[in-house]
Amino acid sequence: MFESPTIAEFLAGSNLASTLPGTLLLTWTLILVLVDLFAGEDRAHWTPVMACIGLGISFLANLFVYAPAEGEQIALYGMFVADAFTGFLNMVILVATLIAILMSWDYLNRADIHRGEYYILALISSAGAMFMVAANDLIVIFVALELLSIPLYILSAFRSIKNDGSDLALKSEESGMKYFILGAFSSAFLVFGAALVYGATGATNIPQIFSLAGGIVGETSSAAFYLLIGAALLFVGLGFKVAVVPFHMWTPDVYEGAPTPVTAFMSVTAKIGGFAALLRLLVTGLSVLVLAEGGAAVWQSTATVIAILTLVLGNFVAISQRSLKRMLAYSSIAHAGYIMVAVAAAGTANVIDAATQGALIYMMAYMFTNLGAFAVVMAIEREDGSGGNIEDITGLARSRPLMAMAMTIFMLSLTGIPLTAGFVGKFMVFASAIQAGLFGLAVIGVLTSVVSAFYYVRVVVNMYLRDGSAELQPALETQYVRWAINIALAGTMIFGIFYPLATNLVSMVSIA
Amino acid sequence: MDVTGLSLTTITLFLPMVGLAILLFMNGETQKANLKWVAFATSVVTFVASVLMWVNFDPSTAGLQMVQRNTWAEVSLGESVINVSYFVGVDGISMLLVLLTTFIMPISILGSFGSHIFEERGREKLYYIFLMLLEWSMIGVFVVHDLIIFYVFWEVTLVPMYFLIGIWGSEERIYAAVKFFLYTMAGSILMLIAILYVGNRAGTFSTYSAGGDIGVIERVQTWEAEGTYWDALGPEGESEDAGFLFNSVESWLFLGFLVAFAIKVPIFPFHSWLPDAHVQAPTAGSVILAGVLLKMGTYGIVRFNLNLFPEATVAWAPTIAFLGVVGIIYGAWVSYAQDNVKKLVAYSSVSHLGFVVVGIFALNAQGLQGATLQMVNHGISTGGLFLIVGMLYERWHTKEMADYGGIWKVMPLFGGISLVISLSSMGLPGLNGFIGEFTILLGSLGSDYLGFAFTLFATLGVIMAAVYLLKMFQHVFMGELKRPLSGEDGYKLTWSEKAAFIPIIIMIFWMGIQPIVFFNLLDVSVDSIVALFVR
């Protein structure tokens, strides 16, 4: 029978050290709850400052996890894996959270809803994303997903805590509600899928699923059937989280209604968490699902179809949007499509590493660029929520030349023009697709990025080529949102121009 | 061959970036007057550097010279790791086009000196920054020999040109700028897919072999000897086989590259962005667009399509050359029908570049040499024509030919210069245009791949060029003066305008009278390409 381990044995087996980045952040956040509770009104700025410090501590701890010589570390009895994949994405998530907090600071002050809970929720969500990228077990995926999502539901509705009956408060409430219901719905899919996979294989641990599934696939048994259905349901559940077509319906409304920094934050972290889990699940766990010996995994064709649908719908519908936030919402759907291209490419056995690395670089590039774009949008929004339309940035190049230049670079990066991070991401993703022999997918991918150029360039046209007077909010004379833009800009430029930096960072990532 | 040291090519390539850096730090009103001087000085220094390259260039050796190659990044594709390298160097063709670029830049900057666009639109600093960025990326396109870095430079040229047209252009500038951007991007992005396939299949992105690493070109030749080819799955048919055009990997790769280049050239029917972009662009923009940017397309065909896909080149040669001939006739025809003088010159580019295309796909030494020389000739004479149009517009603020007339009477020097440039453009013997067109026609006549009809119809284009250019000259410069300017001063050419014309006139005569200097530069480089197509 099962012997309960001694405490020493428990600690040795749990290998807590390698979970430190996430657990430290979570612990820090719990301390922050108390600090926020007892700090008076006049010390309201303590919470965001301490939140940033927490991110810094977690970042330092993560450097040890990421240390390439160590190889992969299994922790918490196989539930948790700390490898270069985890380490890299942890860094991306932490930087994203930092930028989002810098944006929020100004936003909350402007909207007069400055509450410490906001930062605490953001940090919890960020810790959830960090657990998700390290999840090595279906149960951990689920728990981490909830930890990531539940704070986001609250944050989406955050504007409505000042219930003045304004349009903004209502929209924010609607956003939170919609996100919550669809999120709960997708979690149900995920759990049901996990249950079926467990029923088929008898394991929830992803590497174990890999070894056990190998025996099932060949047979024509009910187990193989349940495994497939389970895998499909897991795909659907995570598909909702990363907002790929046809599971994207909630995205535009939720993104538009939520406070802008929250939109920026969730458009990045939720996608990173979702794609990380999807990659681990499909590549580490289910790459054994092949039709013929040495062939591509069965989910490759599914991923290809989803990628094509996502690319086409996201990019074409974005064209017709007037609101910048909605445009960026649809463009974020399209970018999920590009990452999906890499996921599809990972279905071919000898491309797995290249495709995973491509997906990671794409996520990093997308993180910097998208957060930067949202920061600029936030900077030009008015307090009543108007001013976020494409006409409202007309003439920004005259009133704010530096901000217009930053926005131009973000738009070029989202389009995938060389010398920006976006190009490096697209290049890696398409290179892996070509290597996997998915030529049609690659061609559709590049053609839709021409379509995307149409609406991204329109932003540049309005800023530079038309005359107008886009004015900034006086409340934004504070430095924080500028810092957010600067960090995002630096990331976009540095990783775009010094291409090897990005590739070196992910060169030892391997999750096969 | 020194492959790691800092080569003269690198210095020339990055000089514009030095200028750009200086411009970035020039703020305030006092500095405003100096902006153009910094830009001009940078472009002159770059030109001097490229002349130094020419002096150092040994036309009798084949292959690249003044090479520098450093590994830039390692891309892991599946099990293999592929290097992306910073790989620059010049052969005769690159050398000539680098010279053209650095020659056109100071001229177009001089052409902007007296311009009124800044009074209306301002942002002078940004303007010169974009010009420097453009020069850097254009030189880059002509000197790099790594497919990925080539693609980077190729796409980067889009951004400054887009802003030049969009901010400082005429009334319809926004439409023209967006059309230019989207049209050319749509073409070049398919090239990215083809590049990735090539790199994946050949195991390298370098086109030429250097420092012990085998380049794509050499690999293609080994495959041919082995009987395997671009299709990784197995041997592939010869160009004569049925179904080669649409069923072979090589053919699709060829098209992936060709569409990108054809849009840039532009080869008929991909030309519809050109009249808009040319007409709306500011003078310097038009000069650079016609003078250099279009040559990036024809250069790309020579450098990549011919070298990497010889079988497909042979298979597609008649079709593309046919489109070239259609372009010659169509461009000339439409050009004749224009009332807008700038549009007339723009369409004449379609016609002239048609000659270049025919010359390239004649696939023999004369054709290719003529084509390369014609690229330079067209850059000089059409660049000159756009300068003329720009100076007319500065004075009369109209582009309609009907509004002009009799300008020769009031501006005799300007009229004379314009006559020389027009004659050069229509290919008068003794001037540069004749040399290029004549050699191309000679090449197409002796070609193994093109028939007599190609030469016949191309020759018609020479006659039609005379028709539309003389029409323009007659309408604008001869007859009665329709719209006298209010003051006499307006008729005088400023010193910067004169200075811009002097090098153009010198080159027109030099290349016309002593073409052997330029043919020598090309001889060996062209032969190494043509060797692929000897039957």
Image (cartoon, coloured by chain):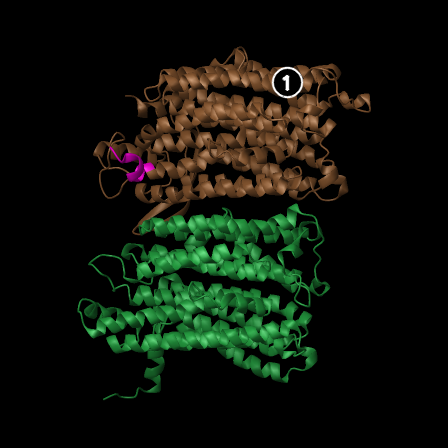
Could you tell me what secondary structure mostly forms the magenta stretch?
A: helix
Is residue B353 shown above or below A199?
A: above
Provide the residue designation for mark 1. B473
Q: Is residue B97 visible?
A: yes
Q: Where does residue A224 sit, x and y in percent of width and height?
A: 22, 71
* Apparent side of residue A188 relative to residue A383 in the rendered image (left or right): left
- Chain letter for the brown part: B
Residue range of the region highlighted in magenta in the rendering: B242-251
User: In this image, B39 relative to A355: left or right?
Assistant: right
Front-most of residues B107 and B330: B330
Image position of A427 with respect to A106: above or below: above
Number of numbered discs overlaid on the protein picture: 1
Q: Residue B161 lies in what quarter of the image? A: top right
- Point 58% across, 35% down: residue: B276
Residue B175 falls in which quadrant of the image?
top right
Q: Residue furthest front?
A: B337
SS under mark 1: helix
- Residue type for callout 1: Phe
Chain A pictured colour: green
Q: Residues within 10 Å of mark 1 (few under 14, many from 20)?
A: many
- Please identify the quadrant where the C terminus of chain A is shown: bottom left
Quadrant housing residue A63 = bottom left
In-front residue for pair B8/B225: B225
Check if residue B249 falls in the magenta segment.
yes
Marked residue chain, label 1: B
Residue at 32% from the left image edge and 87% from the top image edge? A6
Using the image, determine if residue B125 lies above or below residue A472: above
Q: Residue furthest right?
A: B487
Query: Going 69% across and 80% down the picture, which residue do you hit?
Result: A41
Q: Nearer the viewer, residue B441 or A483?
A: B441
